[in-house]
Amino acid sequence: MSEVKNEKNCCCDCFGGKTKERSEKEYKDLMNRLSRIEGQVRGIKGMLERDAYCVDILVQVSAVTSALNSFNKVLLANHIRSCVVENVRSGNDEVIDELVNTIQKLMK
């Protein structure tokens, strides 16, 4: 992603599905978080390959779960601040139902 995203971060139905243009800062933050999580998962795989103790692996899996939850919180906050707010201001209140359904899925 070498181009700088424009200031309008709306969700739209481009390309047959919803998309969102993110700022370079938001994109880099999310990608950095995912890269760290990916590294943690590779580390767990290595632990398993080295016959690490079950509890040690479980502790690392818990750390990955926490990191994914943190990623979700950041992404959800960004979504509410941009997509949801913009849609509500435009009169599209259906986005509230989508948000509620998304939160319910995240809380399972």
Image: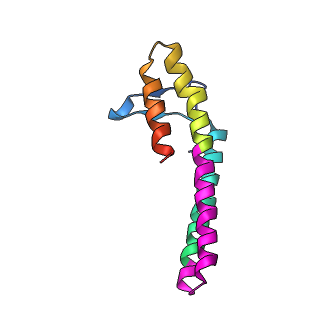
Give the residue drawn at x 53%, y 25%: 84
Q: What's the magenta bit mostly, secondary-structure-wise?
A: helix
Horizontal and vertical percent for residue 99? 48, 31
Locate the N terminus by quadrant. top right
Residue 57 against residue 7 in the figure, above or below: below
* Magenta-span inclusion, residue 69: yes
Scheme of image coloration? rainbow
Task: Report whether 12 appears left or right of 37.
Answer: left
* Image quarter of residue 93: top left
Residue at 63% across, 42% down: 74
- Residue 6 in sight in this render: no
Where on the picture, by quarter, is residue 86? Answer: top right
The residue sitting at 50% across, 38% down in the picture is 103
Return the x and y of residue 16 as percentages of the image width and height.
32, 33
Viewer can see residue 17: yes
The boundaries of the magenta stretch are 46-72
| Relative depth, front residue between 24 and 44 | 44
Above/below status of 96 relative to 17: above
Image-quadrant location for residue 61: bottom right
**Does residue 28 show up magenta in the picture?**
no
